[in-house]
Image: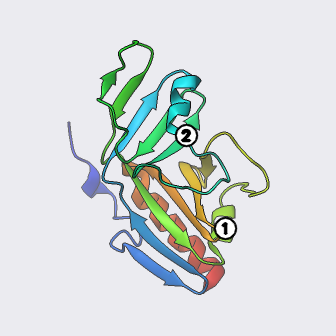
Amino acid sequence: MRDDRTRWPAAQHADQRARAFNGLNLEVWEPSRAFLITGPKPFLQLFSPLTWPEPAQPKAGRVALSLRRDRVLVLGDPGMATGVTADGRSLVSDMSGGFIFTRLEGAEALTVLQSGCALDPREPSASVLRLWHGFEAMIFREGEQAFAIGVEAPWFDGLWSRLVTEAELRLL
């Protein structure tokens, strides 16, 4: 397959891994392990998947994100082998290296995230997936003024560029 990456300029700000603004800090975070688990809801509930807007509280060194009714992304070790489960009803796929996140901390973190989609901490959702400025992104809370947004790795440079641009427009 032909590599066309050199035909387009690099994404703005792609060489930066952290930025600080007035009221906002951005930092790139790449989970060491990531597993996509697909299966029936009772099985997925074993991972205590995170929904919006509850804050992430890692359990056994992992965070499970509720993506869809039948899908959870576990950041960290799920404690099981990849492949089809013994009952044949679920699938565990190693997606390590497939997702990159940015942590947003500070008083303006939610404001920057709200620039790209309807995001209300008083409105619960069964999923952390949102369409943020056109990116299918996972957005979850890490604390009172701390959030994370992540996408599949090939889309990360564009997401990072958009985050920095939104922060610059609002906070500089």
Cα distance in 3D space between marks 1 and 2: 24 Å
Q: Which residue is mark 2?
A: 48
Q: Quadrant of residue 172?
A: bottom right
Residue 121 location in percent, x, y? 74, 58
Q: Secondary structure at mark 2?
A: loop
Q: Kindly identify the residue that appears in the image at 41 percent across and 76 percent down.
A: 18
Which numbered disc flags the more N-terminal residue, 1 or 2?
2
Between 49 and 22, the residue placed more toward the observer is 49
Q: Are marks 1 and 2 in contact (CB under 8 Å)?
A: no
Q: Residues within 10 Å of mark 1 (few under 14, many from 20)?
A: many
Q: Is residue 145 above or below residue 79?
A: below
Residue 58 location in percent, x, y? 48, 54
Q: Which residue is mark 1?
A: 110
Q: Type of residue at label 1?
A: Leu
Q: Kindly identify the residue that appears in the image at 61 percent across and 48 percent down.
A: 131
Residue 3 relative to residue 159: left or right? left
